[in-house]
Amino acid sequence: MKQPVAALPGAMQAMMGLIDAVAKSGLDDKIKMLVDLRASQINGCAFCVDMHAKEMKAAGESDERIFSVVAWRETAFYTEAERVALEMTEVVTRMADKPDPVSDELWARAEALFDERQMAGLLVAIATINVWNRVNVATRQPPGIPHT
């Protein structure tokens, strides 16, 4: 099957609308790219891992930061805001793993670093990449090929 979001009338426009809304939220582009890569790693989306690692490289990210996203807790390559965003990405992506995935403590740390629009952007970014991952994995979209 071709990419479902491209095959379903209106779906691509809806997804691009979410991406545009996140871009206008004030969420730092580096954080958005980290979110996209980490969720894609968790979900095993080869298409998105490939695309977002290349996107980060093109944006000037170091190899250390790109390669260590999967082990972000064990490195000193990320800011506190990036760490909170990566943790939020993990718990929201893996919601079924815990009865209370987004703890009050994590939420408070996020609120201390992001304003309401940025928090909304972060959550919508996490939700959006999870949609992309799920349709790509389900249809085995190969890495390196543009969606059409």
Image: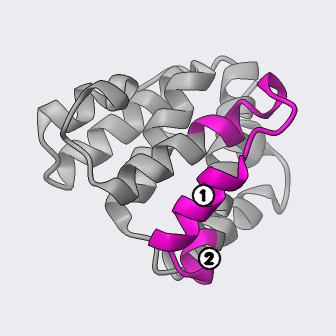
Q: At 60% across and 70% down in the image, what residue appears?
A: 119
Nearer the observer, 39 or 90: 90
Asked if residue 78 lies left or right of residue 45, the reply is: left
Residue 43 visible in this rendered orientation of the protein: yes
Q: Label 2: which residue?
A: 21
Q: Residues within 10 Å of mark 1 (few under 14, many from 20)?
A: many
Real-space Cα distance between discs 1 and 2?
Answer: 9 Å
Q: Which residue is mark 1?
A: 125
Q: Residue at x 38, y 59 (%)?
A: 81
Q: Quadrant of residue 9?
A: bottom right
Compared with 37, 125 (above or below) is below
Q: Residue at x 26, y 46 (%)?
A: 78
1 or 2: tag closer to the N-terminus: 2
| Residue at position x 54%, y 75% in the image | 118
Helix, strand or loop under label 1: helix
Which label is found at residue 30?
A: none
Quadrant of the drawing holding the N terminus: top right
Q: Nearer the viewer, residue 78 or 55?
A: 78
**Circle 2: residue type:** Ala
| Number of dots carrying numbers | 2
Magenta-colored span: 90-119
Q: In the figure, residue 3 lies in which quadrant?
A: top right
